[in-house]
Amino acid sequence: MKNKCVSFLRSKKLIILILLLACSGCDSEKVGLRELKRLCEKDAGLTINKTVEADGYYDDTTLCHHCWHGLLNSPFKYIEFCDLESERHPLTNAIKEQGCYRLTKVSRDSGQCHVEIDEDIAKRVIEPFVSFKKEQCIRAESIEKPTEGLGLFLNKDEGMVIERDFSISRYEYGIKSLDSNYEYGKFINYSLVIKTVGGAQHVCDSSLLTGERVTVKNPSLYKAFIKKVIVLNKEILL
């Protein structure tokens, strides 16, 4: 009987501790959300200086572990990237050598499908993989340097706000000319990370701030950013 009482008291203390930590997390989240809201209202959002025609772009924000995933259902024909420093492990990288590459959507009967990338796409049974692999695949070709005169870049200030229970980072994406450095558009976002038990992550288009859920018809600001600044040749409105 004594052992049962001791066990019950220990369980009760553990439950109380968990509840206290959860409450602490709720308070931290409220404080963090207030600060996130203030920063988002200060300068977050999309700025378009000029739309630009292109079939693809150089992505300086990726080392391409699975960067072709985003290409499958995008309107663009290709993306380019460079990885000149990190180790590319055979088990985790379909493109195994360092360097610059262009990944292009091509017809499956072209005979140009990259074997490892095709295997990655083939084993996935959800959209857009299922529809894409029926008639298309990805070609990967080594290039000396980015050949497209347009690039996506990221400047980040991680931990610009650091508190005991949360931190906030700032991310500024820019689409620029590789030749003149002219900035066609930029997108600024902030990310709140709660450090306590049950912690969450929120950004400026979080439903807790906007009251709107991110859906296909209402895409996240980041996904909408690239498509609004870079327009396919046949779709550009002059």
Image (cartoon, rainbow, N blue to C red):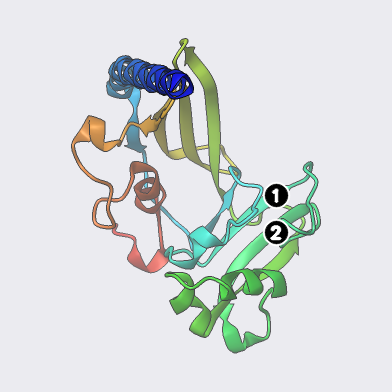
Instruction: Classify 10 Å Cα crowding around label 2: few (below 14), some (14-19), many (20 and above).
Output: many
- Camera-side residue of 72 and 18: 18
Give the residue type that dot 1 points to.
Cys
Residue for point 37% across, 20% down: 12
Picture quadrant where residue 185 is located: top left
Instruction: Classify 10 Å Cα crowding around label 1: few (below 14), some (14-19), many (20 and above).
Output: many
- Camera-side residue of 177 and 101: 101
Residue 175 appears anywhere in the view? yes
Q: Which mark is residue 216?
A: none
Residue for point 72% across, 52% down: 145
Q: Quadrant of the C terminus?
A: bottom left
Q: Residue furthest front?
A: 1
Which residue lies under the disc numbered 1?
Answer: 82
- At numbered mark 2, what does the secondary structure look like: helix, strand or loop? strand
Q: Residue furthest left?
A: 211
Query: In the shown orientation, is residue 63 left or right of residue 235?
Result: right
Give the residue type that dot 2 points to.
Tyr
Q: Quadrant of the N terminus?
A: top left
Spot occupied by residue 24 in the image (x, y as percentages of width and height): 35, 15
Which residue lies under the disc numbered 2?
Answer: 101
Spot occupied by residue 116 in the image (x, y as percentages of width and height): 70, 70
Residue for point 32% across, 31% down: 204
Total labels: the figure holds: 2
